Image (cartoon, helix red, strand yellow):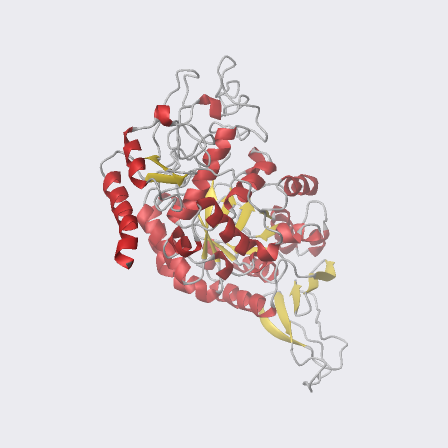
């Protein structure tokens, strides 16, 4: 009886695999309508980008007039409406799906939403992507500790980079990292990947997937850098006479904004001349180095959602880093997150202005965190000048003052340490910086070069202290002193931190020693509150101030 029941499904799977090898399609696309499954090429222009188009939804679109030769296969699988998306990416799904009710239920909701989109019965849910871990197994995003898994120089050697990541995954996990940020994976006009063209063309794909799968085994979430502000064309358009024809997915000039100016010395020219049928007006700042994408286009939105989902389901990413979010409205970031339900999202909004940051957080509905450039620059100034009043700037300073839950703290990244040539400081100053960001609220992100530099042991110890003390982006923060030569503060009820050469101790003036030194270095110290403080007998103070 089991053999008879399983035979149609087995025959269907074999039929699909065999048929897919006889066509030029990169992958096979399947999705179930009310009565049938549509099978076609992922990148076929015949059905107007079936795997990415918003018009073919829930099997409701009439595509019989434009079906490719593979249509005959659909008749073979009619009667299997419960099976969808076992191979390749899914098309965008606009079904009304229940929203996640709260942050603590978001991971479970994400999996349920995913299965509803795919129409998989519960007993087939494991086929979503074999080997992937359930999102509810991951820690609370508020307690995440990130590692940027590359620097500017490594971006041009992807094969070596992915192999290096794979090799070091066990040590990353042992150190306490639970999110690794990967660079943009798609084929690009530049070696670094930030001028992407063919989204579905992933160089060194096997090495990348091996690294991601290795991360899953060790409980590490893989975050992909997605560049959605702009895109480089692969062909010259007959309309614009410029590189505004795109492949994978296939777009024309209608997919780019109408007011996108080029870089000097062609700043007087636009990618889209006035007489061309281009898209809408740019919803963000102009990026002159490539045509800006028109996010107001429903088809562009659908193609982006389809690609982001493909990165999750076919490649294995579980989190997104949105590049250059000043280039398009925050509401579209919120839309893409709603569609894909990633574990964690971070936007790069390169600014320190509180009004602009709060506006972007509001526009993106608080669904994405953002890198805390205000903290980075004020902390750098404070350490270099030994003047810690910089940290008290509540407008251009740390987001910890007004949006700690949305803050991702960092000292350097591929931009500051790369093209900008603006490193945070020397080894001692970098250690002081990590003594702050790894003990304070926000989601901290460690830079690649810093981890493989002379401060690795210090970073490892500070991560351990952070996690043992239960510090998250929700933790409280109280500044005791922030002046010339001294910063001192308390995080939660379990950590005390000092920067600078000034004298300070959390045990000063107390009859018993409630705080023990957890880690220290030149001009910095972190204390951990003893569990027995106020309860059991503890060692009395010797009358001397505890000074680093």
Placement of 305 over or under 398, stated as above or below: above
Placement of 540 over or under 186, stated as above or below: below
**Residue found at x 61% / y 61%:** 472
Q: Residue 343 or 423: which is nearer the viewer? A: 343
Residue 521 in view, yes or no: no
Quadrant for residue 544, please give it: bottom right
Q: Quadrant of the C terminus?
A: bottom right
Quadrant for residue 507, please give it: bottom right
Residue 128 picture location, percent across and down: 40, 51
**Residue found at x 26% / y 57%:** 3
Placement of 541 over or under 214, stated as above or below: below
Q: Quadrant of the N terminus?
A: bottom left
Residue extending farthest to the bottom is 537
Residue extending farthest to the front is 1
Q: Residue 513 or 135: which is nearer the viewer? A: 135
Q: Residue 55 or 147: which is nearer the viewer? A: 55
Residue 107 in view, yes or no: yes
**Residue found at x 30% / y 36%:** 75
Residue 209 picture location, percent across and down: 35, 51
Residue extending farthest to the top is 275
What is the total number of numbered labels drawn onto the structure image?
0
Residue 293 picture location, percent across and down: 50, 29
Q: Residue 509 or 494: which is nearer the viewer? A: 494
Residue 223 picture location, percent across and down: 47, 50
């Amino acid at each position: 009886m089991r053999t008879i029941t399983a035979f149609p499904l087995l025959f269907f799977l074999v039929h699909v695999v065999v048929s897919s090898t006889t066509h030029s399609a990169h992958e096979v696309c399947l999705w179930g309508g009310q009565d049938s499954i549509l099978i076609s090429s992922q990148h076929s222009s015949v059905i107007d980008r079936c795997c990415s188009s918003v018009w073919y939804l829930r099997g409701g679109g009439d595509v019989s007039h434009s079906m490719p030769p593979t249509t005959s296969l659909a008749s073979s699988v009619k009667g299997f409406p419960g099976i969808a998306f076992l191979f390749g990416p899914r098309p965008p799904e606009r079904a009304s799906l229940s929203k996640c009710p709260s942050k603590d239920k978001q991971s479970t909701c994400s999996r349920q939403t995913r299965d509803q989109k795919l129409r998989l019965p519960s007993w087939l849910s494991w086929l979503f992507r074999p080997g992937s871990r359930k999102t509810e197994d991951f820690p609370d995003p508020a307690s995440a500790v990130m590692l940027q898994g590359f620097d500017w120089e490594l971006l041009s050697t992807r094969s070596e980079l992915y192999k290096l990541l794979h090799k070091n995954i066990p040590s990353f996990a042992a150190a306490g990292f639970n999110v690794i940020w990967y660079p943009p994976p798609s084929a690009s006009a530049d070696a670094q990947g930030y001028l992407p063209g063919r989204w579905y063309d992933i160089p060194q794909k096997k090495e990348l997937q091996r690294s991601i799968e290795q991360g899953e085994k060790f409980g590490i979430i893989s975050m992909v850098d997605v560049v959605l502000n702009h895109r480089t064309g692969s062909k010259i358009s007959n309309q614009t006479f410029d590189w505004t024809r795109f492949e994978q997915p296939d777009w024309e000039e209608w997919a780019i904004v109408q007011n996108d100016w080029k870089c000097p010395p062609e700043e007087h020219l636009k990618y889209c001349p006035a007489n061309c049928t281009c898209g809408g007006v740019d919803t963000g700042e102009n990026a002159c180095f490539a045509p800006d994408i028109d996010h107001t286009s429903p088809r562009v939105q659908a193609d982006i959602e389809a690609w982001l989902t493909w990165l999750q389901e076919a490649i294995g990413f579980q989190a997104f880093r949105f590049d250059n979010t000043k280039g398009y409205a925050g509401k579209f970031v919120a839309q893409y997150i709603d569609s894909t339900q990633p574990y964690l999202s971070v936007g790069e909004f390169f600014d320190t202005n509180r009004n602009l940051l709060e506006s972007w957080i509001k526009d993106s509905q608080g669904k994405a965190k953002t890198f805390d450039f205000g903290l980075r620059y004020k902390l750098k100034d404070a350490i270099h000048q030994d003047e810690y009043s910089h940290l008290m700037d509540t407008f251009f300073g740390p987001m910890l003052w007004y949006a700690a839950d949305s803050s991702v703290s960092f000292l350097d990244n591929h931009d500051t340490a790369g093209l900008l040539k603006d490193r945070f400081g020397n080894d001692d100053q970098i250690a002081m910086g990590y003594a702050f960001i790894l003990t304070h609220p926000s989601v901290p992100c460690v830079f690649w070069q810093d981890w493989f530099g002379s401060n690795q042991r210090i970073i490892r110890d500070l991560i351990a202290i952070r996690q043992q003390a239960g510090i998250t982006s929700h933790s409280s923060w109280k500044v005791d002193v922030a002046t010339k030569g001294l910063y001192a503060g308390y995080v939660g009820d379990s950590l005390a931190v000092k920067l600078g050469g000034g004298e300070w101790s959390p045990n000063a003036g107390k009859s018993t020693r409630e705080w023990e030194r957890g880690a220290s270095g030149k001009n910095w110290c972190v204390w951990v509150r003893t569990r027995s403080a106020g309860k059991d007998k503890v060692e009395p103070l010797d009358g001397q101030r505890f000074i680093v």
